[in-house]
Image: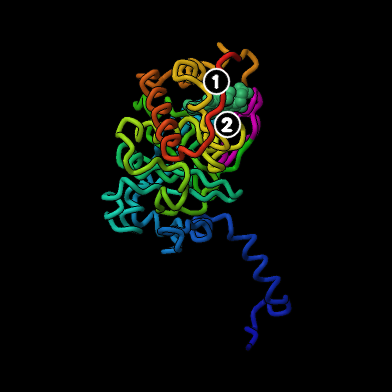
Amino acid sequence: MSEPSGSVHSIPTALVFAFSVVLFAPTIVDANEARALRFARHGELLASRSLSWMRAVSAPTAVRVFEPYEEDEVVFEAVSLETILDAVYTPSWRDRPDLLFVFRCSDGYEPTVPVGRALEHRAWLAFARERSGPAPSGQTGFTIYKLESGERKLIPLAPFYLIWDNLDDELLRAEGDYGWPYQLVGIDLARAEDRFPRMVPPATTSLYALEGFAAFRVHCSRCHAIAGEGGTIGPDLHAPVNITRVRSREWLQRWIADPSQILPTSRMPRFQRKVPTPSRVIDQIIAYLSALAERDPAAPAEPNLDAH
Ligand code: HEC
């Protein structure tokens, strides 16, 4: 390698490189190239797309949302999720409301959202936060102050944060932080039966109970598992015994609506106040849980436990 007879020739190349990274890394262009999302279909990698590529495909837009972790209105700079999905998967993803998106976050968290939600509501991939005036307590950059048991915790959002146009959308507002993954590094278009084979109700399930399954995914599965699939904060609602075999429909209605009415020390939150027809949605969730019990009739029936 021929050394140029310039002024830096005595400095080792690696050091020059390190210097230029320090000098130029903060410019937008370099940061955009480094930031990328990996897109997959049924677990197989399709493409990795940089922020620069996304900005060329979908014009960056200032999007004002009600940010569910900070619980305040926030403006983000973002590209349209739909437009990016059309470019990566071709618009055929729109014909598959039976599929779901698995969002992969850098800490290993993998929330899912049905494809239908991205068709019914507008989602955006945010890559920067707009701030007017000084940020509270030195908070800067692409971060939020998440409200967690009464305390504020600073959360970095990069590389991407999935946000929803929820300012005029009561239903989305009622669903809280469901479907708002931050530190997003990848998106997989997947089949529910591959992802949650035991959580998916049988093919013969009524539409009523299928809506209950969708509602269960929104409101319950982050805390409750079905036969080991789902959250672990609350008990598994299907294994070893399906909950509808040990609790009556009336008890479940009352419990899910507001557990504190039955058990004042319950750690389970009352059902979302803003859902328009809460008792109908709760009944649909119970119908879904009953459909699972019918699918696995071998599960033993236990004595009724309704007296808490
Ligand atoms: C934030 C976590 C959380 C969410 C969300 C949640 N639960 Fe719970 N749930 C719990 C915990 C924890 C318990 C255990 C009892 C307690 O501490 O209240 C529980 C208990 C239950 C029980 C009683 C089990 C028994 O045998 O006593 C049922 C039924 C239940 N949850 C259903 C649901 C349904 C249906 C949803 C969605 C509408 C839901 N839960 C949402 C945390 C949660």
Residue drawn at (36%, 57%), measured in percent from left and top? 56
Q: Judging from the image, what secondary structure is the residue with disc 2 in?
A: loop
Which of 274/215 is in front?
A: 215
Amino acid carrying label 1: it is Asn
* Total number of numbered discs in the rendering: 2
Residue drawn at (33%, 37%), measured in percent from left and top? 205
Is there any visible trace of residue 196 in the rendered image? yes
* Residue 133 within the magenta-colored segment of the rendering: yes
Q: Judging from the image, what secondary structure is the residue with disc 1 in?
A: loop
Q: Quadrant of the N terminus?
A: bottom right
* Residue 263 within the magenta-colored segment of the rendering: no
Q: Residue lying furthest bottom in this view?
A: 2
Beta carbon at label 1 within 8 Å of ligand 1: no
Residue 169 is situated, as x and y percent measured from the top left of the image, at 35, 27
Above or below, 110 relative to 308: below
218 sits left or right of 183 in the view: left
Residue drawn at (53%, 24%), measured in percent from left and top? 246
Res. 263 image quadrant: top right
Instruction: Specify few, some or many for label 2: CA neighbours under 10 Å numbering under 14, 14-19, or 20 or more.
Output: few
Above or below, 292 relative to 96: above
Res. 91 image quadrant: bottom left
Q: Quadrant of the C terminus?
A: top right
Residue drawn at (56%, 27%), measured in percent from left and top? 302
C-alpha distance separating marks 1 and 2: 58 Å
Which of 257/84 is in front?
A: 257
Residue that badge 1 annotates? 304
Amino acid carrying label 2: it is Pro
Specify start and end residues of the magenta stretch as a single range.
132-153
Q: How is the image coloured?
A: rainbow
Residue that badge 2 annotates? 134
For ligand 1, the image quadrant comes to top right
276 sits left or right of 105 in the view: left
